[in-house]
Amino acid sequence: MSISLAESDPEIMALCREEKERQKLGLELIASENFTSKAVLQALSSSFHNKYSEGQVGARYYGGTEIVDKMEALCKKRALALFGLDESEWGVNVQPYSGSPANFAIYTGLVGLHGRIMGLDLPDGGHLTHGYQAASGRKVGVFRCL
C-alpha cells in the first residue's frame, strides 16, 4: 500500500506523465476538461476517496463516517455562505451524482408513463433509489414515472 505508482507500475505512471504534458501544451475548450488546481487534486486523492458514505450527515447506512460527516457539514456551510443563504431557510446537497440518475433514466425508459417497478427493501439488498422508508417516517427515493 505504500509503494508509489512509479514503482508499482512504471508503464501507467509514464502514461500519466505523458497525459499531464499533453495537457500543459494545449488549450482545451471543453468545459468538462478544465484544469484542476493542485489543492483540488490533493483533496481528490485524499483518504476520503477510500470511504463509502451513503446517506445523510448523522444518518449514514454504514459506520465509520464521523469524519465524512464533518467534511460534508463543512461543505454545506461553505456552499450556503458562498451564495449568502441562511441555513435556517435554505438547504444544499453537496453530494456528487452517482448511479442514481442513471437508474432513474433507465427506469423511466423501461416502464413508461405511470409505470411502477418493484425493488427490494434496503436491508434486504435493495438500493436507496428503489425507495426506502426512513426512520423519520418519510420515504426516500420513491420512483414514479409521471
Image: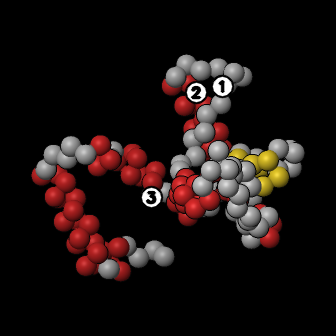
Tell me the amino acid under the disc marked 3. Ser
CA–CA distance in space, label 1 to label 3: 30 Å
Residue 20 location (% of width, % of height):
22, 59
Mark sitting earlier along the chain (1/3): 3
Other residues around mark 1 within 10 Å, as few (<14) / some (14–19) / many (≥20): few
- Please give the residue where the numbered disc 1 appears in the rendered image: 90
CA–CA distance in space, label 2 to label 1: 8 Å
Q: How many marks?
A: 3
- Please give the residue where the numbered disc 2 appears in the rendered image: 80
Q: Residue at x 76, y 67 (%)?
A: 120
Residue 18 appears in which quarter of the rendering?
Answer: bottom left
Tell me the amino acid under the disc marked 1. Trp
Q: Quadrant of the C terminus?
A: top right
Residue 31 location (% of width, % of height):
29, 43
131 is higher (above) or lower (below) than 126:
above
Closer mark to the observer between disc 3 and disc 2:
2
Tell me the amino acid under the disc marked 2. Leu
Closer mark to the observer between disc 2 and disc 1:
1
In this orientation, does residue 98 appear?
no
